[in-house]
Amino acid sequence: MAGETSDPFNTEAMLPPKPALRPALGMGDAVGDPCTEAMPNRALNLFEVVNLALCNNPQTRVVWASTRVQAAQVGVNKAGYLPGVSLSASDNRTKTGSAPSVDQRSVDVTLSYLLYDFGSRAANLENARQLLAAASATQDSTVQTVFLGAVQTYYQTQATLAALNAALESERAAKESFAAAEARYKAGSATPADKLQAQTAYSQATLNRITADGNLKNAQGSLANMLGLDANRSVLLAPANTMAMPNDFEGNINTLIEEARQRRPDLQAASAQVKAAEASADAARAAGRPTISLAASANQYNTAGVNSNGSLVGINLNVPIFSGYSTTYRVRAAEAQVDARNGQLEQLRLQVALDVWMAYQSLTTATQSLRTSADLLNSAEQSERVVLGRYKAGVGSMLDVLNAQSALASARQQRIQSTLNWNISRAALAQAMGSLDASLLQTLPDLGGQQPSESTTHTRNQ
């Protein structure tokens, strides 16, 4: 019967949906199960990266299976409200001394039905339900963790790609400066020191480009790992678009903290764990109380060809009198577990406030840095053009050119890093609030910066 009835208590209906983004976007079942799709053979955007991570990352599969385990435990405890029926049969042949052998056959059918147990079954069922609620909330928390990890690896990969483009541009500028210094040296209007300084800067820019290329490959490996793939699998991302400046954001930090305490799935899981511990304590108390059950049996015996039948129907009362104080200490342990769970809940409440506070301040800092980095990059680009033009015209020194190019390279890197920090800080604040979902992806832009150049594409293909 257990094999033929897969889910008689319909516990699967208690499960949260599998981790995926499309239902959250209101696309319904019309698109089918998004986790059944194969890896797209094209460049991936942010939405696709997150969705593939939720579907394929082993963390989400583990937590989904753990939730199903807890749902099955609810079914186990519901089974305690149903009667139990067992069948036993035996066929024996006995022989004593020289007497002829005697055949003995018996068939017994027994029914037992627990009528009342002073709340033990109800407490165990409530414990299982609360543990299922905790497992479901833990699944939500894990989904948000994987979600944030996917967003971070996506933007980290885009940032390293932009950093490689910036390194290539710096290398090109250093090569141009070296060519200008060499031309002036041959014309007799520059010293050998100018040429050597330009050549040194060019070599340093080449080393920086090589390092940036290695960082990009590492980031691509981390991205593949986040998507549940081997690190050597190639994952292409859609080209990044130039990002507009962020709008001002406002929020009362006290309101944000209270909202987070209402929405954070890990806090909901901790609250369910407290209720499960309280139900476990109730079950421990009820274990020392009487039980009333209905018992019925029917049997048939055949001994040496003589048949006999019997039946029994009765009410059994079981009263525990003394169990060596085991019930007492089980209750004490269960009550202490309730205190421990309450302490963990309060600790997590404080941690939620700290998470929101730090994420909010990080986003504030990242927003200000993003605006400032835009001004820094603009002024550095203008300065580099002016200084290099003066040097080519025979006015100015190579040291001024190298300083301007170094400042421009630094400004490009700061612009890339500030953009990366802003995008990740937004997602981190959403996770701290417990509201990291598919709707955030509709407002998160791609990483700002240059489009992948032909040399970058060639490097990636290699």
Image: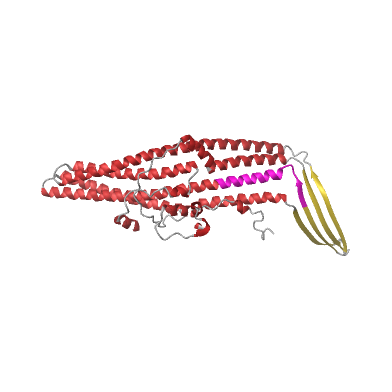
Q: Residue 249 at what x, y percent from top left? A: 41, 40
Q: How many marks?
A: 0
Q: Residue at x 48, y 48 (%)?
A: 437
- Quarter holding the C terminus is bottom left
Residue 32 at least partly seen? no
Q: Which portion, as a residue range, is magenta?
A: 112-137
Q: Residue 212 at what x, y percent from top left? A: 33, 49
The question of residue 420 being in magenta is answered with no
- Quarter holding the N terminus is bottom right
Q: Residue 243 at what x, y percent from top left? A: 35, 48
Residue 201 at least partly seen? yes
Q: Is residue 188 left or right of residue 36?
A: left
Colour treatment of the image: secondary structure
Q: Is residue 102 above or below residue 19?
A: below
Q: Is residue 173 left or right of residue 103?
A: left
Q: Residue 225 at what x, y percent from top left? A: 44, 53
Q: Is residue 388 left or right of residue 265?
A: left
Q: Is residue 389 above or below residue 342?
A: below
Query: Of helix, strand and loop, which mostly describes the magenta segment?
Result: helix
- Would you identify the image quadrant in which residue 121 lies? top right
The question of residue 115 being in magenta is answered with yes
- Would you identify the image quadrant in which residue 416 lies? top left
Front residue (pair 149, 88): 149
